[in-house]
Amino acid sequence: MKFSLLALLSLTLTAQAAAPPSPGAQFQAFKVGTYSAIALVDGAIQEPNDGKSFVVGRPTAEVAAVLKDGGAPGDHFEFSIQPLLVHAGAHVLLFDTGAGNYFGEIAGKLLGSMAAAGENPATVTDIFISHAHGDHVGGLVTPAGMLAFPNATIHMSAPEWKWLSTMSAESAKNIGITQVTALVGAIRPKVVAFEPGADLLPGVVKAVAITGHTPGHSAYRIGSDPNSLLVFGDAMHSYVVSVREPSWKVAFDSDQQTGAASRAALVAQSAATGQRLYAEHFPFPGLGKIVKSKKGDVWVPETLH
Ligand SMILES: [Zn+2]
């Protein structure tokens, strides 16, 4: 009997998409080339499929059909939150920081997950922020407003830092930052703003500008090819809809048209190159690739043991 690779792949995909996350999982170790990496649970967010909370401009029934076909519930979106820690020689790198105490009980578990993985926040040397939404920068500070990673340099693109550091309290609340003055005051001495696309730690971390989500949204490429990992920030949120219908507009994007174009380009390029990807909002641990299938481009999670 002969199976086509694509048929096998779609079987695998369906099986993996339907599998529930292991209960109580807090972290997942894996390798990026010779580097040791750990996906760290911070929490999860749900948004209704109501035509305005995530996907905009498409009938909710059409969105539900795509979700169900991808093995997800049709009435809502589930977004995991999982920052990434990488040991690269003497550097201890953290990619985004979760929501801290900004989202209440549903998130803010990063420090607990790090402790479970045997990691000490004081040893983190470099934090790379994809963008200044609450679920990515909230964990930079403790509930008392102190730096959660006191010895780390905080890398953020110059347009993103300008946006965050001049934001009104009301605008900040709309993007999930409940105490923007305290946040900016605490992190200011540690922030090193970079030009989009900068080579930040040569050979280790390079910024990759992906425009549309926020004024200075940045992905990061870790390591060098063929073993590199692209941490794409919030260029995609839903492992089903963002991959299958990347040109649909998303309420979270500050420039929805540019965001959709960037996402479509990222999906097409990832499917063409087989780039290994790290997705902060896809089902835990968020590691995988985008592959062309008979259903179009689909997310295929990496199987880890
Ligand atoms: Zn996010």
Image: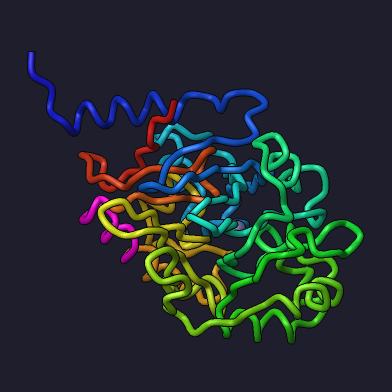
Query: Where is residue 224 shown, x and y percent of the image?
Result: 32, 60
In the rendered structure, does residue 122 fall within the stretch colored magenta?
no
Q: How many numbered markers are drawn?
A: 0
Closer to the camera in the image, 20 or 305: 305
- Determine the image quadrant of residue 119: top right
Q: Quadrant of residue 289 in the image? A: top left
Q: Can residue 57 be seen by looking at this rendering?
A: no
Q: Over which residues does the magenta segment extend?
A: 265-274
Q: Is residue 250 in sight in this rendering?
A: yes
Position of 22 relative to 122 (above/below): above
* Depth check, front residue: 209 or 12: 209
Which corner quadrant holds the C terminus?
A: top left
Where residue 148 sits in the image (x, y, percent)?
78, 58
Q: Position of residue 166 (x, y in %)?
A: 74, 86
Q: Is residue 270 magenta?
A: yes
Residue under the point 50% across and 45% down: 37
Magenta segment main secondary structure: helix
> In this rendering, is residue 77 above or below 98?
above
The residue drawn where x is 31% and y is 51% is 227
Residue drawn at point x = 88 percent, y = 64 percent: 145
